[in-house]
């Protein structure tokens, strides 16, 4: 078998109020694609960050290619041939794509920055991942999927022989995810060891030859993926059986029209979009990156303003020119990027959950703190938010628990229309099942839900109707019973009409 690429020996790591890792020992074979599996808070990302030099273990040893190493910084990890693709984007928004990609080794000529060489290097690094974009564009202006591809290019282009992929496909469409899968195959052919952290079962079984399961910070098992079923893996991860981790909600039938959008247009993003949402209905919105899905959601929530078209709520025309106006009309948004648009990271989970509801929780302009705490406690229990208390800083929670706080915030509002943009991004299989069940429960209670997801099985399972966008235009509508992944992909890419009714 040879010397493993990575060996953890009795590694432990504590954070205030939580034991993230406890006596973890496991090996990762050189040249393998090894998955780290577990629920949010199981310790997967912490283990990856220790290997990437972002965190130091309190106890235990780390060996790379048989040699004990101490990695006190990302530069130490880079010198050891280790790179990491982070779940949460870690680049400088105000710098260009090229500057971000070459930041560790900026090319110079005569003591001055050689911008031409920097842009050439950046373009070559992106080409390795099959990505083409303007490297002079500020990183912060890119859609989140393109930002993720830039981060992947940085890890691959650095020449590392061990790469940690922490939820790399969580913000990618299926087409971009397929590009990443092909890239990882090429990396393995070159002898690169890939450590893959993901909640998506199909890609774990597609890419990985071996997996290790963590539960509550402890190493539970290491198994070859061959011969292991999804059900067995779920049971190892959560310690209980989930018969169907993408459960279908019950058909509730069409209620009264709650939202109607007529010929909404935002130049350069989407054009002439029309749809209706009825009480108790879940409508899916499918499309590739750049199709206009998230931009449409942001416009409905008042983050962008359409140049033409109309929005009606309960039959009355409304002007949505700000989030305040959207909330007043009963429209709420769980955004694609929770850190930038969904949370105040330095505030407590309690205060984040109550922000839109403060007017309800106040009397004579004074916030009634006992009511605020009762509300937060109720929704945290309902969503199973894992936090030492509601007073913890939300930025210190795992990605899945942060997402639950965003959901709690809007559930407390009891909105008429709930827009969910990638609601299970970075969420583990147990929490995903809970969120799917919650979507069904909200629909049964009469909430109109617009669901945007890059996971086509999720869209097909949860939506009663699926609208397909391509290049900013509505190109088709499919009923759930007629929908297939292949058919939707054909419509999304323009390779065929797929199954369903073509849009007028």
Image: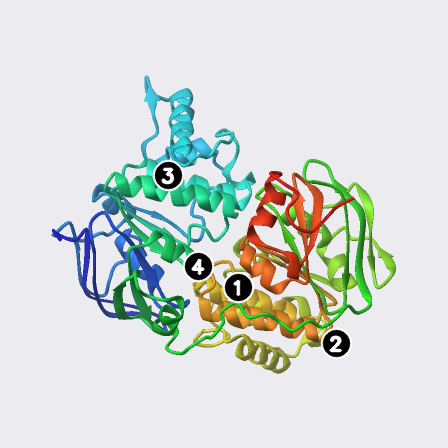
**In this rendering, would 62 be left or right of 478?**
left
SS class of the residue under badge 3? Answer: helix
Mark 3 or mark 2, which is nearer the start of the sequence?
3
User: Mark 4, mark 1: which one is toward the viewer?
Assistant: 4
Nearer the observer, 235 or 127: 235
Give the class, few, some or many, for how many residues have Cα within 10 Å of label 4's Cα (few <14, many ≥20).
some
User: Which residue in the structure is indicated by mark 4?
Assistant: 200
Q: Which mark is residue 154?
A: 3
Q: Residue at x 23, y 65 (%)?
A: 58
User: Which residue in the structure is indicated by mark 1?
Assistant: 403
Q: Position of residue 191 (x, y in %)?
A: 23, 42
Mark 1 or mark 3, which is nearer the start of the sequence?
3
User: Can see residue 412?
Assistant: no
Q: Position of residue 279 (x, y in %)?
A: 76, 68
Give the class, few, some or many, for how many residues have Cα within 10 Å of label 3's Cα (few <14, many ≥20).
many
Could you tell me how far apart the alpha carbons at marks 4 and 2 are, in whole angstroms?
Answer: 48 Å
Q: Position of residue 396 (x, y in %)?
A: 43, 64
Give the class, few, some or many, for how many residues have Cα within 10 Å of label 2's Cα (few <14, many ≥20).
few
Could you tell me how far apart the alpha carbons at marks 4 and 1 are, in whole angstroms?
Answer: 17 Å
User: Mark 4, mark 3: which one is toward the viewer?
Assistant: 4
**In this rendering, would 494 be left or right of 218?**
right
Nearer the observer, 410 or 36: 36
Q: Residue at x 57, y 43 (%)?
A: 289
User: Mark 2, mark 3: which one is toward the viewer?
Assistant: 3
Mark 1 or mark 4, which is nearer the start of the sequence?
4
User: Which residue in the structure is indicated by mark 2?
Assistant: 364
Give the class, few, some or many, for how many residues have Cα within 10 Å of label 1's Cα (few <14, many ≥20).
many
In which image quadrant can residue 408 be found?
bottom right
**In this rendering, would 108 be left or right of 500?**
left
Could you tell me how far apart the alpha carbons at marks 3 and 1 are, in whole angstroms?
Answer: 27 Å
SS class of the residue under badge 1? Answer: helix
Q: How many numbered dots are placed on residues in this image?
A: 4
């Amino acid at each position: 078998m040879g010397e493993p690429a990575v060996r953890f020996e009795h590694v432990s790591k504590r954070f205030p109020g939580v034991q993230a890792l406890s006596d973890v020992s496991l090996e990762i074979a050189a040249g393998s694609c090894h998955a780290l599996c577990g629920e949010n808070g199981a310790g997967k990302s912490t283990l990856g960050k220790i290997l990437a030099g972002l965190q130091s273990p309190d106890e235990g040893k780390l060996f790379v290619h048989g040699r004990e190493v101490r990695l006190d910084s990302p530069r130490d990890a880079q010198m050891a041939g280790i790179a990491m693709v982070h779940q949460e984007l870690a680049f400088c928004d105000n710098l260009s794509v090229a500057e971000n990609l070459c930041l560790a080794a900026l090319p110079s000529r005569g003591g001055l920055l050689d911008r031409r060489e920097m842009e050439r290097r950046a373009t070559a690094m992106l080409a390795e991942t099959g990505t083409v974009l303007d490297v002079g564009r500020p990183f912060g202006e890119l859609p989140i999927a393109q930002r993720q591809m830039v981060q992947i290019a940085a890890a691959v282009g650095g020449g590392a022989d061990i790469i940690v992929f922490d939820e790399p496909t969580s913000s990618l469409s299926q087409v971009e995810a397929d590009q990443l899968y092909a890239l990882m195959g090429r990396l393995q052919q070159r002898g690169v060891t890939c450590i893959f952290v993901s909640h998506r079962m199909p890609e774990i079984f597609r890419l990985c030859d071996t997996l290790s399961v963590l539960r509550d910070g402890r190493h539970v098992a290491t198994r070859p993926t061959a011969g292991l079923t999804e059900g067995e893996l779920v049971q190892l991860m959560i310690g209980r059986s989930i018969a169907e981790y993408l459960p279908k909600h019950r058909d509730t039938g069409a209620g009264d029209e709650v939202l109607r959008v007529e010929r909404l247009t935002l130049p350069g993003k989407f054009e002439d979009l029309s749809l209706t949402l009825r009480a108790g209905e879940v409508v899916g919105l499918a499309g590739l990156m750049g199709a206009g899905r998230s931009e449409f959601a942001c416009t409905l929530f008042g983050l962008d303003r359409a140049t033409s078209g109309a929005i009606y709520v309960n039959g009355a025309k409304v002007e949505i020119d700000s989030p305040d106006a959207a909330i007043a009309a009963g429209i709420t948004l769980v955004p694609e990027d929770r850190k930038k648009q969904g949370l105040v990271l330095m505030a407590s989970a309690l205060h984040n959950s109550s922000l839109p509801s403060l007017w309800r929780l106040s009397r004579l302009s004074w916030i009634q703190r006992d009511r605020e705490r009762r509300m937060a406690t109720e929704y945290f229990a309902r969503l199973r938010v894992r936090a030492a208390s509601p007073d913890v800083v939300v930025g210190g929670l795992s990605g899945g628990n942060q997402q639950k706080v965003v959901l709690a915030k809007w559930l407390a509002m009891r909105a008429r229309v709930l827009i969910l943009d990638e609601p299970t991004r970075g969420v583990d299989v147990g929490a995903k099942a809970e969120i799917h069940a919650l979507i069904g429960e909200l629909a049964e209670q009469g909430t109109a839900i617009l669901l945007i997801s890059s996971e086509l099985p999720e869209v097909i399972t949860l939506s009663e109707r699926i609208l397909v966008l391509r290049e900013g235009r509505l190109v088709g509508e499919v009923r759930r019973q007629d929908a297939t992944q292949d058919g939707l992909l054909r419509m999304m890419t323009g390779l065929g009409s797929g199954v369903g009714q073509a849009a007028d």
